[in-house]
Image: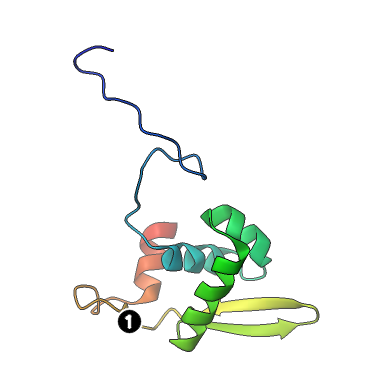
Amino acid sequence: MSKTAKPSRPLSASGETSRWNFLTNHAHVLIVLYSHPDMVLREVALRVGITERGVQRIIQDLEDEGFLRREKVGRKNHYQVLTDESLRHPLEAHRTIGDLLKLISG
């Protein structure tokens, strides 16, 4: 290895080289469901890189706090991200979920 080359980092389950992320799994679940409101939880879990049970807990958290609404459509669920809700941390409370989604989704 040359003096200027950086050592490689171990790959995570999702194939990324970082050991930590700037966004939480809660944010990742919101981002996926915003783009794909009818996606099954197994697929959400694969995309986020956590277990299906973990996604279920996060969805319950997001529903309990008023950031997500779930509607049963036949045998499937449809998720609506409530984009007008403010972010929770005091440093970001002046911004909404919609602001974050616009930034991430482009």
Residue position for label 1: 86
The image position of residue 6, as x and y in percent, is: 26, 24
Question: Residue at image x 54%, y 67%?
Answer: 54
Q: Residue furthest top?
A: 2
Residue in the foreground of this view, choosing between 2 and 87: 2
Q: Is residue 15 above or below residue 89?
A: above
Question: Residue at image x 20%, y 78%?
Answer: 90
Say which amino acid is labelled 1.
Ser
Kindly state the secondary structure of the residue where label 1 is placed: loop
Q: Residue furthest right?
A: 74
Q: Is residue 8 above or below residue 47?
A: above
The image position of residue 92, as x and y in percent, is: 24, 73
Which image quadrant is residue 79 in? Answer: bottom right
Q: Quadrant of the N terminus?
A: top left
Residue in the foreground of this view, choosing between 17 and 72: 17
The image position of residue 29, as x and y in percent, is: 50, 66
Name the side, left or right, on which 105 lies relative to 86: right
Q: Is residue 79 above or below residue 13?
A: below
Which image quadrant is residue 24 in? Answer: bottom left
Question: Residue at image x 65%, y 66%?
Answer: 41
Q: Quadrant of the C terminus?
A: bottom left
Residue neighbourhood size for the residue with mark 1, other residues' Cα within 10 Å, grouped as few (<14), some (14–19), many (≥20)? some
Q: Which colouring convention does the figure follow? A: rainbow
Which image quadrant is residue 93 in? Answer: bottom left
Badge count: 1
Name the side, left or right, on which 29 lies relative to 38: left
Residue in the foreground of this view, choosing between 72 and 57: 57
